[in-house]
Image (cartoon, rainbow, N blue to C red):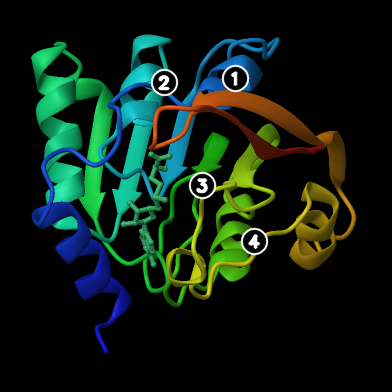
Amino acid sequence: MSTPAEFWEERYVSNGRVWSGRVNHTLAQVVGTLPEPPGRALDLGCGEGGDAVWLAEQGWQVTAVDISPTAVSRGAAAAAERGLASAITWLAHDLTTWRTEGSYDLVTACFFQAPVELARIDILRRAAGHLSPGGRLVVISHAAPPPWASPEHIGEHRFQTPQEELAELELGEGWAIDLAEVRMREITAPDGTPAMLDDGVLVVRRT
Ligand SMILES: C[S@@+](CC[C@H](N)C(=O)[O-])C[C@H]1O[C@@H](n2cnc3c(N)ncnc32)[C@H](O)[C@@H]1O
């Protein structure tokens, strides 16, 4: 049985690029319409950096963290290719043990879900604690398994509604809920047929 660090590093090393390299559609929809100008952003489980690079293109100063050194190095290479190296700090670290003194205007977590052990809610709650007043936590998640997913694929993965995630976060006083909803997204399934995915969207703002 591999550790989460081994599992994810193996996932990235044994494949070429795993993700598209593009920003997650729902994240772009949400962050692209925020009323405030870009500031400091923290991307949790950044993978190969599609979201971090897009955020930097929009003017955010980004800290991007992932447990897989290979994923992070792919993100850094993509950022450098676009002339964005100075806008993103890439960190290969397990967020279970990562600590920061930093404060952020935006914390993003897109599909920060795993078929192996992941202290997801603890990590999200800790990161939310680093938001400045007015800052937002934006969590985009699979609210249901993809129609083609097998039990092995799903593994220990938990699918929750944004409302359930919000309840688990136990944020307490001092937070406004901007969004807690499920959005359907059209995609092409691995077999080439059209399919729909349920994206959970949770946006909370520190008041
Ligand atoms: C499903 S992928 C999503 C990647 C990216 N956010 C995206 O949307 O393309 C989940 C990511 O979380 C990372 N991850 C899992 N557990 C982690 C942990 N404990 N600390 C940091 N990153 C972790 C994995 O390496 C993987 O890149």
The disc, 3 or 2, on the residue closer to the chain's N-terminal end is 2
Q: Disc 4 marks which amino acid?
A: Arg
Left or right, 43 with reference to 89 = right
Instruction: Decide if ligand 1 comes within 8 Å of the CB at mark 3.
Output: yes
For the residues labelled 3 and 4, the Cα–Cα distance comes to: 16 Å
List the residue tagged with mark 1. Answer: 31
Q: Which mark is residue 55?
A: 2
Of badges 1 and 4, the one in the foreground is 1
List the residue tagged with mark 3. Answer: 111
Rendered location of residue 192, percent (x, y): 40, 28
The disc, 2 or 1, on the residue closer to the chain's N-terminal end is 1
- 2 and 1 marks in contact (CB < 8 Å): yes
Left or right, 29 with reference to 163 = left
The disc, 1 or 3, on the residue closer to the chain's N-terminal end is 1
Residue at left offset 30%, top offset 36%: 19
Of badges 3 and 4, the one in the foreground is 3
Rendered location of residue 34, percent (x, y): 67, 14
Q: Disc 2 marks which amino acid?
A: Leu
List the residue tagged with mark 4. Answer: 125
For the residues labelled 2 and 1, the Cα–Cα distance comes to: 9 Å
Between residues 6 and 55, which one lies in front from this camera angle?
Answer: 6
Rendered location of residue 88, percent (x, y): 26, 30
Corner quadrant of residue 190: top left
Where is the C terminus found, in terms of image quarters? top right
Q: Disc 1 marks which amino acid?
A: Val
Rendered location of residue 175, percent (x, y): 84, 45
